[in-house]
Amino acid sequence: MPDRSGCIDRMMRLSPSFRDRWRPPLSVIVAMVLCIMLLVPLGGVVFFRVYENQLIQTTEAELIAQSAAIAATAAEQLKTIDPENLPLGPSAQPPQTQYSYLLTTIGEWSPQTSMLDLNKTPILPARPDARETGEDVHPVLEEVGRQLAPILVNTQKLTLAGFRVLDANGVVVSGRGEVGLSLAHVDEVRKALGGRYASALRERIVDNPQPIYSISRGTAVRVFTALPIVVEGRVAGVVYASRTPSNILKEMFLQRETVLWMLAFVLGATFVVGFIFVRAISGPIRALTARSLKIGSGDRAALKPLTIHGNREIHALSTSMLDMSRKLFDRNDYINTFANHVTHELKSPLTSIQGAAELLLDGGEELTEAERSKFLENILSDTARASLLLNRLRALARAESVDIGGACHLAPVLGQIKGRIDGLSVSWNKDCELPLSEENARIVFENLIENSRNHGASKVEVVVSGGGESLTVTVNDDGEGVSPGNAEHVFDLFFTTRRESGGTGMGLGIIQALLQAHDATIRLAPGHGGGASFEITFNR
């Protein structure tokens, strides 16, 4: 059995509308949406600069807190050992903040906030090496440096931060290395020696990088802070600290189990969304496309609902398409039947005309005047029948494409018809307003009354009943009536019991088509004496 989906794709490729302009299929659009969903968390990792900035500020805040504790300890020791002979530098400046609207002093509190910002702070080169200096370190500061050395080492073991204690000239007095060397030439140290807290972001160079190191623990920058040691409002030294901040990759490595669960959730959610799209949109649309192609090829068996509609809109689209297809099939059947009837009805008079004309042509002088007259009368009679049939066809076409709307009163219409028909009594019980134009109402009732007279009626009675939402107009006559065998065929086109006397069988069909165009119905009502009774119902 051929692959119908492949046939559909080939038909789409061959269709001019698809060749002229490429339009992505719904499956491609769904795939693009799913890819975007997958890129959202990945893009979030790339653009997590705000979080990375928060990590750096957190590192700076921790260094400030640790440095403040060390500076306070150093200041107390300096006061205890020799407060009178301390070499002090410039006056200390109040704490700073990167946001002007934040207060640096609140009562007796003077908090020092983080100053670093990845969006504003430049990343400086690696810290310059310490330099030799000719400055002598004051004995008091040397003693304080020796006392602080084990504290700095133990603190570094726990916090992974590096600490240096400098005197007022920038010479290192305590730390794991560089004791006796000067750092006064470093920008942040120079600012701190001037009495103001300073911080910097510097490049971090790893001498022997390892893959796992760079992924789980490494980062490209290092945070440096320089906090003045303040004694009696003046700078007695500097606590110079540094530490490598955490980064996003490190956090993801540390939280790898959570990240894996999150990734599994994202993939699962993407799969669920894709399944819903296919089940609720893409699949039903492809099925509807295949169904429409079958219907277009004339397969009446395809006129059935889809197995899965997916959603309300596709269900409505499928239902409307099937209704339209049924109407088109019915219309096609009607046109075929109508064409066959018209061919049959016109064939008889045309055959008769052709036969009479051939006899006149072949008979020549041998035909008598009576025979010639008979043949000519047959030609004229059949021509008149063909003309009548064509007029009825035009009337039917007008009835099926009539302009909808308008209103008129019943009594004036019946009065005009009554004045034109002799030998037939027409009466009505009351007047009413009809939802038809006067011309269309005249066509309906004139055809009905003419039909009654042609079937031997001498009296026609029009009865109006109902009102409001439904109006019923019944046309009764005392003619021959309709036999039970013919009752179900009276509205069929070209059905007539008066063919020999010139009936075309289209009058009631014209009436029915015109009323249907106005959302009205007509039926043969039973149980009316010996005559015929037609009931017209208008739904307002």
Image (tube, rainbow, N blue to C red):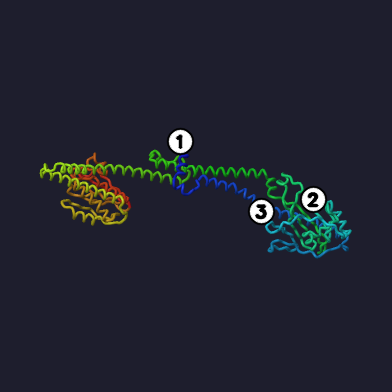
Q: What residue appears at the point 19 percent right and 44 percent down from the top-left corner?
A: 353
Tell me if 304 is positioned left or right of 163 in this view: left
Tell me if 340 is positioned left or right of 121 in this view: left
| Secondary structure of residue under mark 3 | helix
Q: Are marks 3 and 2 in contact (CB under 8 Å)?
A: no
Residue under pointer 1: 2
Q: Nearer the viewer, residue 362 or 61?
A: 362
The extreme top residue here reads: 1
Residue under pointer 3: 49
Q: Label 3 amino acid?
A: Arg
* Front label number (1 vs 2): 1
Residue 407 locus on image (x, y percent): 29, 56
Q: Label 1 amino acid?
A: Pro
Q: Quadrant of the N terminus?
A: top left
Q: Are marks 1 and 3 in contact (CB under 8 Å)?
A: no
Q: Nearer the viewer, residue 442 or 534?
A: 442
Say few, some or many: other residues with alpha carbon within 10 Å of mark 3 (under 14 / 14 to 19 / 20 or more): some
Tell me if 11 is positioned left or right of 395 in this view: right
Residue 514 shows in this picture: no
Report the Cα–Cα distance between label 1 and label 2: 76 Å
Report the Cα–Cα distance between label 1 and label 3: 56 Å
Q: What residue appears at the point 68 percent right and 48 percent down from the top-left corner?
A: 249
| Secondary structure of residue under mark 1 | loop
Residue 90 locus on image (x, y percent): 81, 65
Say few, some or many: other residues with alpha carbon within 10 Å of mark 2 (under 14 / 14 to 19 / 20 or more): some
Q: Label 2 amino acid?
A: Gln
**Residue 231 tag number:** none
Mark 2 or mark 1, which is nearer the start of the sequence? 1
Q: Are marks 1 and 2 in contact (CB under 8 Å)?
A: no
**Residue 156 tag number:** 2
